[in-house]
Structures are given as structure tokens and as C-alpha cells.
Amino acid sequence: MNRLLLGCVILGGALMGHADEGAKALRIVTYNIHHGEGGDHQVDLERIAGVLLALGPDVVCLQEVDRNLSRTDRRDFPAEFEQLLGMPGVFESNYDFDGGEYGNAIFTKLPVASHENHALPGPEGIEPRGCIEAVVEWNGAKVRVMNTHLGLSEREREGQTEAIAALLDERPTVVCGDFNETPGRPAMQTLEAKLTHCRLTDTLEEKDLTFSAQRPSVRIDHVLANAGLKCLGIEVIRNEVTAIASDHLPVLAVLERAE
């Protein structure tokens, strides 16, 4: 059995079976894939795709995506994931080096009405950061999906979340990604003033932690939504495959339109 099929078999019992939420549910996965390299030091996109396909997503948001970089043999990750997932994708580079590109991507089975990349502020000489946005058409509505990967310093993240908050409006919106920050910290408070965390309780338990994959100790990967959407459920996918596939764990959120 290949790794893609193995991932599907192991992960098949994840959050609320695919048919159980009904046609109105929107399934979104956010996953920092560590440029495809797992804890075994193997770059294995089939393994990551198996993790994702098992979750039955409508939208997949990936961070740390390579294209044409020597460390990953000049492979075109966005094109490969389009084939592996069977979903068209949009990719935006935030950091160009070594003749290649590094950034965030969104893949979806839904029609994409538009997409763009928002460059985020940061100090000179530090890895540039961005927020890729795709407007998807879902159940007769247009939903903004914003996927980001914030910086490593608290001050940097504060400026970046302020920039994202300034982009928000009344349209149904999901903001997700690797924020490198735990809930309630200063940068996250900027977004929490306008958005609601997609999590079922205010108290974090071990099952809610997302980093690092083998020994999770913090939750820094989040899904947030505005008043146009309601979270039906959320799950950090932790098992023998995800423990090794990346240094982060994937997060699945199931949402519906708010009444």
C-alpha cells in the first residue's frame, strides 16, 4: 500500500464523518507542512496528501510550500499537490531565494472567484511574510479564506495581525494558518477583537496542541471566523502518521453559515 492510501486508511475516522454534517458544512484544513519534510527527514508529499485527503476537505490551506528550491530538488510543490489532491490551487511566494520560491497555498474543490496575496509588514533582513486570500463560492455565498504564516518575534506578529485585521470586512471570512502565537497573546488579541476562535472550549487540553508534532506543547495553528460563519467542530489530527509527516499537526475545522 502506498503512503497516500495508508494515510487515508489510518486517518479515516477523523472529526465527524464526511457525510454527517450535511451539504451545508464547509471543511477547512490548515497545515504547516515544513517544506514537505517529516520527522524522518524524508520529503514525502504523498504522505501529506494522504493525511489531507482522509479529512475530506473542501479547502486546504498550506504553509511552508516550496517551488523550485534546491533543498527540495527543484520540485514544484503547488503543481504536485494539485495532482495529489485533485484540487486546483493558488500559490503565492513571500520569500524568493536560491532561485526558487517559498510561501503559502490554498487548494479547493470549490470555485474560486478571486485570489490575491497581501504582503505583511516586517523588519528588514527578516523572512518576509504574507497572507494569501482566496474568495470561494460555497452554497450560494462567497467566503473569504485567508491563509497566513506569521513571524517569529512578538513585535513582528503584532504588526502583521494589525495588517490582517485592517483587511477584514462584513463578508463571511475564515482566517487560518500558523500564527506562531498562542491564544490570548498580544498579537492574537488584535484578531480576536474581530474574529472568533474556532475551538469548542476556552481551556486548552493536550488534544488541542499543534506544535511540535511528536511532542505537542503549544497551540500556534488556528482557525478563526467572523460573524458570518459558525464553527460546528474542530480537531487537531494527531496519530502515527501526522506525528512524523511534518513538525506541525494539521487542524480541521467544520463550519456553516451563521443564521
Image: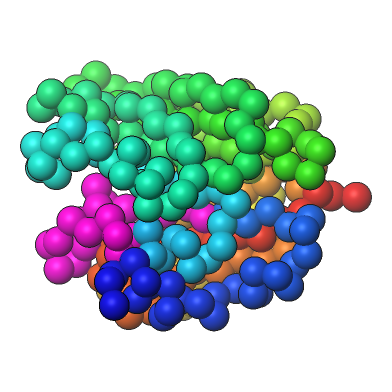
**Coloring basis for residues:** rainbow
Q: Position of residue 82 (x, y in %)?
A: 40, 43
Q: Does any portion of residue 199 appear in the rendered image?
A: no
What residue do we see at 63% from left, 35% from top? 111
Depth check, front residue: 241 or 197: 241
What residue do we see at 40% from left, 31% from top? 91
Compared with residue 243, is residue 198 higher up or lower down, i.e. above or below? above
Compared with residue 243, is residue 229 higher up or lower down, i.e. above or below? above
What residue do we see at 38% from left, 65% from top? 50
Q: Position of residue 228 (x, y in %)?
A: 79, 42
Depth check, front residue: 164 or 45: 45
Depth check, front residue: 15 or 127: 15
Quadrant of residue 159 within the rendered picture: top left
Compared with residue 175, is residue 123 higher up or lower down, i.e. above or below? above
What is the magenta range? 29-48
On-image quarter of the N terminus:
bottom left
What residue do we see at 37% from left, 52% from top? 84
Compared with residue 103, is residue 207 higher up or lower down, i.e. above or below? below
Q: Does any portion of residue 236 appear in the rendered image?
A: yes
Q: Where is residue 131 in the image (x, y as percent from the top left)?
A: 46, 31
> Is residue 34 within the magenta segment?
yes
> Is residue 177 within the magenta segment?
no
142 sits left or right of 67 in the view: right
Farthest residue, direction right: 259
